[in-house]
Image (cartoon, coloured by chain):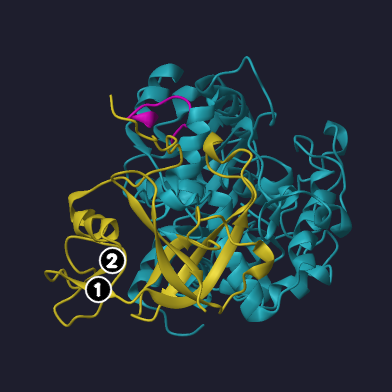
């Protein structure tokens, strides 16, 4: 019997998987932030099988993962029991420099990805992506204050 | 009146026939264990038929919504079976908080098309006592994108919070403005016989309450309630033989800018998107904001009516907070708003109570003094605007109601 240190079971919501999102989640697993884009290379968010509005075929481009906080809401209560006892978590919308807006959590650093202190958050602050491996299969892109 | 587009002319043509709300009914609201979802709907149905002075046999159309407790793919006909009726026209409408005004529109269109003449619109549920904790979790996730929002622990409250915080940032709106909506509506709910929260709260009380998701304290959020509510839509000609004073549907409008909050492009985009519903309803009615006597504005959160007031052109962009702080939305103010207490203080049944309250105001019957409440009647109210919004300020539907027949 080999000794393994099993990760505690992750009880928080995991993404609903749909085929059109597979390249995105494959990317985050490799700690890359891939964005769906149209023929002209202009990205859109969230992943869909066709470019919204024009229904063109899509391609994937890699983002540098830098952006600005458009808005945020400090959640004192989460959507499920798994959040009970946690400090407040910050749900934010981040405008990536690539020109798309995505939802994320703002975290302090990559040591356990603790939530950023609400007092340290402001609209307009610069942030950069980090990759939180929440399970063996799923990696969620989160954001930390840019240095 | 300025030149109108063909769609507005078509809506006017329909409403010039005289489409009215000829009866209303609302049950008790709150925690009502021992009454199931369909039972509550039946109770509201009976109250509404009694108000109109008709029987079930006189109803030939049934429009219902959905239930969080009684899961059925075919809600209208399932409830029709419960009632023991065989309506010639039936539809279930499901657009979240925009459902109630859309039920009225659905009924009006059915009547205009000759599919029915007396359409019962009814919505209710035992959401508070009948829903399991896993059901509540499912509800909390309902408005999130399952892949790109839900994993971040977004709640519906926080989804509104995201937009509200950006709105407050762009327009420099203080927290007190949100609290003023709650305080104002608490004064109104104190007078409404079936309001769940009858105590009057101050701006300071709201500001001192516990946080749920910024910028919302618990008191900024709408209630979860058991109860039901209904209204009967028919023609002015049919209503002549009925018991209560009919209220005319004078304008209808819809607006939509996004579904997921991540897809909302900007604060102003949301304001204009949902605002189109109210602006169009007023255009169809041939009126402007200054003609309104009372407004019943969807209030899922304290922030919700602020952006709607601006979208409808009642206030300028970013000005609704000051407008409420100045007391304009109070009974006795310039344009009383949510005279029944709204979703924040009375009960949450989407926009059903907003429509019923608007109808009662225009009938001159919003005095609950003899019914355990108080007088919340706006003197001589003739024109009301009401709306509902589904999702996170996504789909919106609005009605202008009038005590008098629209001029063709």
Label 1: chain letter: A
Residue B91: x and y in percent read 35, 38
Label 2: chain letter: A
Indicate which label's residue lies in the foreground, 1 or 2. 2
Give the vertical position of B73 relative to B397 (above or below): above
Give the vertical position of B55 relative to B2 (above or below): above
Q: Residue furthest left?
A: A57
- What shade does chain B have? cyan
Residue B187: x and y in percent read 85, 51
Q: Are marks 1 and 2 on the same chain?
A: yes
Q: Which residues are magenta?
A: B66-76
- What shade does chain A have? yellow
Q: Which residue shows up at 17% across the image and 60% down it?
A: A49
Gap between marks 1 and 2 measured at Cα: 7 Å
Q: Are marks 1 and 2 in contact (CB under 8 Å)?
A: yes
B134 with respect to A51 (left or right): right
């Amino acid at each position: 019997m080999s000794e393994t240190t099993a990760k505690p079971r992750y009880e928080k919501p995991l993404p609903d998987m749909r085929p059109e999102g597979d390249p995105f989640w494959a990317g985050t697993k490799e700690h890359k932030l891939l964005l769906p884009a149209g023929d002209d290379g202009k990205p859109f968010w969230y992943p869909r099988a066709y470019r919204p509005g024009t229904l063109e075929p899509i391609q994937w481009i890699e983002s540098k993962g830098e952006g600005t906080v458009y808005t945020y809401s400090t959640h004192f209560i989460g959507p499920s029991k798994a959040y009970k006892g946690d400090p407040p978590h910050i749900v934010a919308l981040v405008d990536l420099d690539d020109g798309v807006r995505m939802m994320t959590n703002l975290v302090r650093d990559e040591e356990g990805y603790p939530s950023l202190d609400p007092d340290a958050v402001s609209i307009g602050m610069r942030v950069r992506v980090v990759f939180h491996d929440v399970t063996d299969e799923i990696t969620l892109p989160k954001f930390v204050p840019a240095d | 009146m300025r030149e109108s587009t063909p769609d507005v002319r078509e809506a006017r043509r329909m409403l010039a026939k005289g489409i009215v709300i000829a009866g209303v009914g609302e049950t008790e609201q709150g925690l009502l264990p021992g009454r199931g979802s369909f039972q509550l709907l039946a109770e509201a149905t009976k109250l509404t038929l009694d108000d109109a002075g008709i029987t079930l046999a006189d109803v030939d159309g049934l429009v219902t919504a959905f239930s969080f407790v009684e899961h059925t793919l075919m809600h209208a006909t399932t409830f029709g079976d419960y009632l023991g009726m065989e309506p010639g026209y039936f539809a279930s409408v499901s657009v979240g908080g925009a459902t109630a005004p859309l039920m009225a529109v659905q009924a009006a269109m059915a009547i205009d098309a000759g599919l029915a003449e007396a359409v019962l619109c009814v919505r209710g549920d035992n959401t508070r006592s009948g829903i399991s904790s896993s059901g509540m979790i499912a509800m909390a996730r309902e408005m999130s994108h399952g892949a790109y929002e839900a994993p971040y622990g977004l709640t519906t409250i926080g989804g509104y919070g995201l937009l509200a915080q950006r709105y407050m940032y762009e327009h420099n709106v203080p927290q007190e403005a949100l609290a003023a909506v709650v305080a104002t509506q608490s004064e109104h709910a104190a007078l409404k016989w079936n309001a769940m929260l009858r105590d009057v709260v101050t701006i300071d009380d709201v500001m001192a309450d516990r946080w749920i998701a910024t910028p919302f304290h618990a008191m900024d959020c709408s209630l979860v309630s058991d109860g039901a509510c209904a209204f009967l839509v028919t023609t002015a000609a049919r209503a002549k033989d009925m018991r209560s004073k009919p209220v005319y549907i004078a304008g209808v409008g819809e607006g939509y800018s996004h579904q997921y909050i991540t897809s909302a492009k900007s604060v102003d985009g949301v304001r204009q998107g949902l605002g189109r519903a109210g602006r169009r309803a007023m255009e169809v009615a041939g009126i402007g904001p200054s003609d309104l006597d009372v407004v019943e504005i969807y209030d899922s959160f304290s922030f919700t009516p602020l952006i709607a007031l601006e979208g409808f052109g009642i206030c300028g962009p970013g000005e609704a907070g000051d407008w409420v702080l100045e007391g304009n939305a109070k009974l006795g103010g310039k344009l009383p708003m949510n005279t029944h207490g709204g979703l924040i203080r009375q009960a949450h049944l989407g926009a059903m109570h907003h429509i019923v309250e608007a109808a009662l105001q225009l009938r001159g019957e919003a005095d609950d003094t003899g019914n355990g409440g108080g007088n919340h009647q706006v003197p001589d109210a003739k024109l009301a605007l009401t709306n509902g919004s589904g999702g996170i300020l996504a789909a919106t539907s609005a009605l202008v109601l009038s005590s008098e027949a629209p001029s063709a």
